[in-house]
Amino acid sequence: MTQPIKLAILAMGGEGGGVLADWIVDMGEHNGYIAQTTSVPGVAQRTGATIYYVELYPAAQATADGGQPILALMPLPGDVDVVLASELMEAGRAVQRGLVTTDRTTLIASTHRVYSIAEKSALGDGRVDSAQLLGHAEAAARRFIRFDMAQAAEASGSVISAVLFGALAGAGVLPFARAQFEDTITRGGVGVQPSLKAFATGFARAQDPLDPATPQPAAMPAPQPRHPAVRALVDRVQQRFEPAAHFVLLEGVRRLIDYQDIDYAALYLDRMAGIAALPAVADTPQLVIETGRHLALWMSYEDTARVAALKTRATRFERVRGEASVKSGQILAINEYMHPRLQEICETLPAGIGRWLMRSSLPRRLVEKLTQHGRVIQTSSVHGYLMLRTVAGMKRWRRSTMRYAEENRRIEAWLACIADTADRNPALAVEVAQCQRLVKGYSDTHTRGTLNYDTLMAALERAGSNLAPATLRELRDAALADEHGNQLRAALARHALA
Amino acid sequence: MAERSFVEEVKKLRLSGGEVFSGEGILAVTKALLESGVSYVAGYQGSPISHLMDVLADAQDILADYGIRFENSASEATAAATLAASVNYPLRGAVTFKATVGTNVASDALANLASGGVVGGALIIVGEDYGEGSSIMQERSHAFAMKSQMWLLDPRPNLPCIVQAVKDGFELSEASHTPVMLQLRIRACHVHGHFIAGDNRRAKFTLQDALQTPQRDVSRIVLPPASFLHEQEKVQDRWPAAVRFIEERQLNEFFSADADDVGIIVQGGCYNTLLRALERLGLADVYGNTRMPLYVMNVAYPLIDSEVLRFCEGKRAVLVVEEGQPNFVEQNLASILRQAGSTTVLHGKDTLPVAGEYTASELLKGARSFGERYGRLQPLPVPPPVRKVFALKEVSAVGVDDGPAPAVLGPLADSVNGRPPGFCTGCPERPIFTAMKLVERELGTHHVSADIGCHLFSILPPFHIGATTMGYGLGTASAAAFGRPDGKRAISVMGDGGFWHNGLTSGIANAVFNRSDNLTIVVDNNYTSATGGQDILSSTALNPTRSTGHEIERAVRGVGVKWVRTLRRTYDVAGMRDLLREALTTKEAGPKVLIAQSECMLNKQRREKPLVRKAIADGKRVVREKFGVDADTCTGDHSCIRLSGCPSLSIKPNPDPLRTDPVATVLDSCVGCGVCGEVSHAAVLCPSFYKAQIVSNPNRWDRMRERVRAAVIGWLQRGDARRREAYAF
């Protein structure tokens, strides 16, 4: 007996899931089908996930059979022909709810991600693995049509629902011709041209659904230094270090020349040479790579001069133009939100002046008063630009600042700890190197990170060679799990390291 | 102005007899009201019946044509009390609200109304917010119908049945002098379908007629001895009259009643889902022709004993499908069958889940279990227990363990996160809670009593603020016990919607009278945003049919609050933080009220977007603002996200080859509300945020300044780039 065609649409608020459902109903009703749709909106309209459900039944069949079909108001798991998901995690949700089954369901989903609040608010990297979602979707569906529809929508100046509608047509799972789909969009009368364009993209991609393979990181072009001193550094990396470490070390050199100067990059390689000479490296080449990565990051710590340098570059102005989609004929102004406090100012000044200012009474209070509120600096104005450029220029006395001395002390201690640990347990040394990841950000965030780092180093010292690499990793993950340090405290207590 | 405009839908209300109405279930109800000749309609908005109120608001000229009075009631209690117009006069009236929260609020009026009874048809349309997507406690309207002895209709969820239920409801109400509730579940409210329209009707007896010749009848008033009389009337006259009407009009339906010696009794609202389950089991076809006898109760209360006994006669067993608990219907059926000495076995919650929504899969399972038990279905073969077999595989030599790892699929649940609702992009309420987080850092945590409304999203990530929520407008009241003048102050949050609904009296005035020392934050965004952006007393919009512009601050001062502050730009995070600190530390006794005022961004954008588009097209100078994050200075800690939770503030892979943590990024949907910048200032976050101002149609001064800037800055930048280039490789 003829069965209704059953479609479920999973979308988030504001993505046009309702429009898509209405299009399908309208297309059905104009082409000889009895159509029904319903949804459960409610609070879901504010960023939550919504399921729209549509059923279509041929009217001619109903007339011939002399009946009116009883259509359902919610999908029955295992009884859905087409599932449309506007985003990859929503596709995963459809699978989780049992709406996607290998015997019949065509799953049409966008592969882009709209990150959940849990993913976004993690202190480090809280993203779920898209490969897992893709794997489950692939395993659950009879046919899985997927591509980045957000990109397709943007390229055609339209919305995802139009691309999904196109992909639905292209999949060929509904008894309607392309023209019938397109007529539906035209009948809707809103944003018809962009929608049709997005529809066409979706249609084409669904017929050739292979997502272009994720672009492999382009093989690093052979470095071609022009400056003799730079060439010497590059040669040093290439001749004295294992090839596996070249990428990271060259990036490190590049970064530190940009951050300070040639000598600073040379210091980086000096330090790395010390690590590369450790006997443990023979069995654990990872140690050079991880230390190289984190040493470069630590040596290029973010201070006021660095931020100002990055903010005033031409490349950065261009990037903002792109991000703000500035069209020709429009004028762009860039405003920075800065909040340098007494501490940051003292850190940037030559150590002597910085210390004096920290300890002084009236000047200190004056600066504190001046820095009570954040400042908005318009980098795109001549005045603001010159101000930031001047701050950027302060890097020339960076080596004499309080902050530099402090960071160097910490770096040296960290390197010594790595070397020391590597003798006993190379794997643990790799974990120690990665602990630098905790120290990041500015002001309170930086203070918190540094505190966590110190806590871990203290735990390491206390446990000595008894600490397993996995335990240190666990502590590091715990430190990144919440802002208040609750999980770290619990983990320390669990391992009797508190 | 409501979130959605129904100008198109309203035209459907003018359809006349024979034309086809096509649209949402809840809109069909509005048409049915017109066809029933109502004289007045009132209600309080809320999912899933907000659209009903919004359509009526947009249809006031049509309502005027038919002499219908339409009220946006102050609360559900107001709405229910409005039905008093039908007590003495043959006036048909309908009210609507969300159940069961609305039924709770309205229950005083409903109970009094049901006691005295009505002359004109009185219909209470409740949007039953039960099951998936529900935002309220899981209770049912059924209990209210039973306790006050009102009749409850639960029609099959298709448009013709829903429309017929409205019309039957008025007649049933008049025939039995009893108010009638019409319950519509969420999916039924939003279902798209068709019905053949009838002609709209104008009431013969009008509101003016009533006012010209007022009637009173002391026996209709709830006072002894009349109230004792009402109790007897209910059982001796009204109930039997209702039963007679329901029987004669055959409001309940029998399908293939004699086809088998087992059968299913189902409430109308669950019919479609049950039918799908039976069809999948091969017991029915897609048109509803069933081999399994069905008794469909489109009237959920009262039960009709004669029909039940007729259906059960000669049946070995029946299954009752009754969603939610307690199982009122099942108990009622049991007593009917028992008293009649019936031997029919009754199944219900023994076969179906005791609690929770009856989804398609639950009904499939229940119907299968029932069918198997009575031999109507072949039991599914039980799959033989799967023994784990460890195949002998070639393994590499011991100690060599570094082959490529197989792609292992982990549990899907690990990869699918919840998507709790949050504040919209640019929402003016978000910075209030950001400021609360900042004050928390200084003064420690406080007890926070939350309320119903968008601001309730603050209890969810990333804010985690709010300990209880006791009901709409009850934020302040639910901190009453903590109002003592020593120790830390409790903080209450209340929306402008809740404030006018009852919070002014139940919360603020109560706090004044009881000398409470607590702080109440009134979130005033100019609309009842959570229910779809309807206007209220303090709305600033010019509404041609309603009186707006009544300030909350004046009302608060009017009931005697001395410490009142109004912040007119909630995006000012530092200002908000300072006011909060002051409110929590001031020596002044008595309740503190902080009114946080900024327009709902959804409504603002809806109003302003078309204007901006037009201005740009007309060549006018327009400045658009958008925030952004510099990926090279962002270190991937995401403090900003934890203090904001804006949908437009997201993450992206780190472009830095040495870093792995994703960096923050601002999506194109940013409306430039400014909170990102304010937060990074107030919380001293990081210097990564920038605000881009994009000037369309720049004027001569803009262009001249831009030329100077490009010349100076460009020259310097080119020089810097050259110097860097020398060291590049």
Image (cartoon, coloured by chain):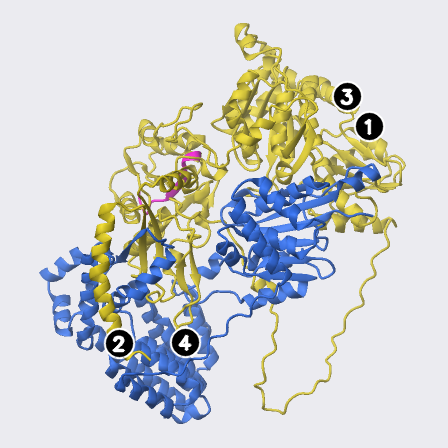
Chain colours: A blue, B yellow
Q: Is residue A138 left or right of residue B97?
A: right
Q: Chain of mark 2?
A: A
Residue hosting label 1: B306
For marks 3 and 1 on the same chain, the one whose residue lies earlier in the sequence: 3
Image quarter in which the N terminus of chain B is found: top left
Up/down of B679 relative to A351, above or below? above
Give the residue drawn at x 22%, y 76%: A404
Residue hosting label 3: B244
Residue type, label 1: Ser
> Could you say which disc has been placed on residue A497 in the image?
4
Nearest the viewer among B492 and B31 is B31
Label 3 with label 4: CB-CB less than 8 Å: no
Label 2 with label 3: CB-CB less than 8 Å: no
Label 4 with label 1: CB-CB less than 8 Å: no
Nearest the viewer among B612 and A10 is B612
Q: Is residue A410 left or right of residue B318?
A: left
Name the spot of residue B667 as percent of width and height, x first: 42, 55
Q: Chain of mark 1?
A: B
